[in-house]
Image: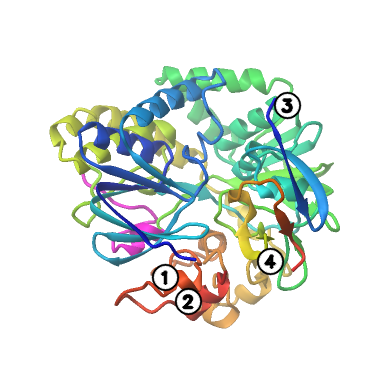
Amino acid sequence: MSKDLEQRFDVVVVGGGPAGIAAAVRAAECGVSVGIVDDNATLGGQIWRGTSGERQEEGAKVAAIWYRRFGTAGITALCGKRVFHQPEPGVLLAEGTDDLFELGYRNLVLATGARERFLPFPGWTLPNVLGAGGLQALVKGGLPIRGKRVVVAGTGPLLLAVAAYLREHGAEILMVCEQAPWSSLARFTAALLGQPEKIAQAFELKRKLAGVPFVANSWPLAAHGGQTLEGVTVSRAGKSETIPCDYLACGFHLVPNTELPLLLGCQVGNRFVPVDDFQQTTIAGVFCAGEPTGIGGVDLALVEGQIAGLAAAGRRAEARELFGARRKARRFARILDRTFRLRAELRSLPSHETMVCRCEDVPYSRLQRLSSWRAAKLHTRCGMGPCQGRVCGPATQFLFQWNPDSVRPPVFPVRVASLARFRGGAKPEQTTVAGGLG
Amino acid sequence: MPSQVTLTVNGLRVSVPSGATVAAAVAIAGQACRISVTGEPRGPLCGMGICFECCVAVNGRPHCRSCQTLCESGMEVRTDE
């Protein structure tokens, strides 16, 4: 089954979203050999997924320019391959559907992106309750949404973007519920006044969402249904209101994917990967760009990716020219962080029976008396299923202030045949193997 | 017009546009993706290969993330094993 392909590059980029694409393009344009690896079938990450330049928004135009540069830069793209281990410094293992790849690198750029933060509330495990980005991804992947009634809820700028996208594709958006208070949103809007391109995006969203109720200070209390979602009760202005719907698209902003940086031994502080001016992590030759260094959106990801790619190719002077642009983009990141801070009320959403760990079906009642993430893993198997705590980890961090443990290989469940390739590394955890036998 | 791909989900024939994910095909077929360890029906959550809620069997291979697997003509998808 394993083909065991080996390839070596001057620069390997992990993650094919905007940060990874920008890093790969800038490095390859310097004349070094570049390989980019991504676990999705196509490049583009979550934000550029499905944008082939056919749409005329600003974002699609930017994507089209980068795709064009990517196409002529001579980059080797390995899609549908998931990096799961570094058996020795300078070597990564990645698994595809039927094969195993060994990727050698001199310098590495980690552009692993972010995922949505999910918070448990009664009924959140029902089919058709998805992440906001989750539902958008499914629709981009061919899920018919025309005529479906959708409630969008949670927090963060993604909610409006998703609502606009779904509406464009024929969905009936019943309500957008943003947990942040109006006062924070007003400050957010004011802060955008210094950034004309962001204002243009905001106006475009406003036009696309004309007539859709947008409610601040509002969050889901419970999702209802038997075998699938039938409606959602939301808190709105201190009262609860039940809305029948077909889909609930609910995400609470983003959390960075730091499992791979942690596996490689990069320092990770306060959830994010600290980097120097050239986007280099605490490990020499390992760079990090985009959301893992701080949630800042596509503009920051593009500039960080470029700096990382140039630095990884040894072009520090050219990288330095982008520092000003990065400073500006980082201001937006700080504003995002302040605006979409989670309110304390969200901690009391789960009932005793609400599943917190969806892989192992561990309810809230079994976790609330425990003292740590480690204790939860030992006593309840919370976080021990195939997602390896990627969903319940950030949730319990918010609910109980638990801090995640160290990461062990493989960082994703893999086939036994792939595990057999571990050379001298740590023995895989029994439980992670059980989660991913294939 | 995008070309169509026909596959089966639990034996039901489903046609989807080429480039569609197996997760979309499962939803079109009206099926849950998996049954949780305590017996609850589950569908996709994250849509990006993180949560493993959308795992199905594709052509006999179990534990495939349907959100990251593209439909192919004649593919056999099962959510009930």
Identify residue type, mark 3: Val
- Reading the chain from its start, which is encountered first: label 4 or label 3? 3
* Residue A77 lies in quadrant: top left
Whole-angstrom CA distance, mark 2 to mark 4, is 18 Å
Q: Amino acid at mark 2?
A: Arg
- The answer to the question of whether label 4 and label 3 lie on touching residues, with beta carbons closer than 8 A, is no
Quarter of the image where one finds residue B42: bottom right
Whole-percent x, y for residue A320 in the image: 18, 32
Question: Could you tell me what secondary structure mostly forms the magenta stretch?
Answer: loop
| Protein chain holding label 4 | A
10 Å neighbourhood of mark 1: few (<14), some, or many (≥20)? few
Label ID, residue A374 = 2
Vertical placement of residue A64 versus B39, above or below: above
Lower position in the chain sequence, tag 1 or tag 4: 4
Circle 3 crowding by C-alpha within 10 Å: few under 14, some 14–19, many from 20: some
The mark that comes first in sequence, 2 or 1, is 2
What SS does tag 1 mark? Answer: loop
Seen at 42% across and 76% down, the residue is: A428
Residue indicated by mark 1: A405
User: Label 2 is found on which chain of the structure?
Assistant: A
Residues A192 and A250: in front is A250
Q: Nearer the viewer, residue A259 or A121?
A: A259
Q: Which residue is mark 4?
A: A355
Q: Position of residue A301 (x, y in %)?
A: 38, 37
Q: Is the C-beta separation of discs 2 and 1 under 8 Å?
A: yes
Residue at disc 2, secondary structure: helix
Pointer 3 chain: A
Above or below: residue A308 compared with residue A53? below
Residue located at (67% from left, 38% from top): A139
Residues beneath discs 2 and 3 located on the same chain = yes
Q: How far, Cα to Cα, is label 3 from label 1?
A: 42 Å
